[in-house]
Image (cartoon, rainbow, N blue to C red):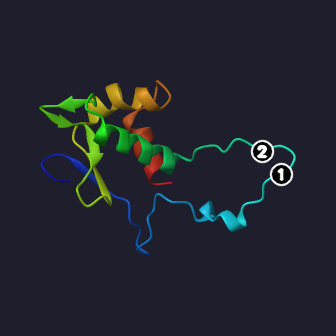
């Protein structure tokens, strides 16, 4: 925590980006030739998209002039500045309307 904010490091203990699936290697994926299947977005990818949107969007949710969630300048961590704003205004824009902060945190640690 820093100044009452939650900082989340997305680099795992092995030095790899914890937000990437090991299954992302195109050589290991098998796709049907007859009918392409729509690829479901994983939580880590969806989360990265949310943080990117909130970091770069001029209309992002702000609290006291700072964005509620955004990437830190290093790009390997993100900061949650306001849990209440995140739960009530950010998460409903991108996830199920009833997404609670603690559910969001549990998904981070899966």
Of the pair 38 and 4, the residue shown nearer to us: 38
**Residue under the image location 20 percent in, 53 percent down:** 1
Of the pair 33 and 76, the residue shown nearer to us: 33
> Is residue 32 shown above or below 27?
above
Is disc 2 surrounded by few (<14), some (14 to 19) or many (20+) residues within 10 Å?
Answer: few
Q: Is residue 96 left or right of residue 13?
A: right
Horizontal and vertical percent position of residue 34: 87, 46
Q: Is residue 62 left or right of residue 43?
A: left
Q: Secondary structure at mark 2?
A: loop
Q: Is residue 98 left or right of residue 84?
A: right
Residue labelled with disc 1:
32
Figure quadrant of residue 49: top left
> Is residue 19 shown above or below 93?
below
Find the distance from the CA under tag 1 to the CA under tag 2.
Answer: 6 Å
| Image marks 1 and 2: residues in contact by CB distance under 8 Å | yes
Of the pair 19 and 57, the residue shown nearer to us: 57
Horizontal and vertical percent position of residue 21: 56, 60
Report the residue that reaches farthest toward the right: 34
Horizontal and vertical percent position of residue 87: 34, 31
Is disc 1 surrounded by few (<14), some (14 to 19) or many (20+) residues within 10 Å?
Answer: few
Figure quadrant of residue 54: top left
Q: Is residue 8 left or right of residue 98?
A: left
**Residue under the image location 51 percent in, 60 percent down:** 20
Residue labelled with disc 2:
36
**Residue under the image location 66 percent in, 45 percent down:** 39
């Amino acid at each position: 925590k820093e100044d009452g904010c939650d900082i989340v490091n997305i680099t795992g203990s092995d030095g790899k980006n914890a937000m990437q699936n090991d299954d992302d290697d195109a050589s290991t994926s098998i796709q049907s030739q007859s009918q392409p299947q729509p690829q479901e977005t994983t939580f880590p990818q969806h989360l990265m998209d949310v943080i990117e949107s909130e970091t770069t969007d001029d209309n992002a949710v702000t609290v006291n002039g700072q964005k509620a969630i955004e990437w830190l300048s290093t790009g390997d961590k993100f900061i949650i500045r306001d849990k209440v704003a995140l739960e009530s205004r950010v998460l409903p824009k991108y996830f199920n309307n009833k997404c609670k902060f603690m559910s969001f945190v549990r998904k981070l640690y899966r």
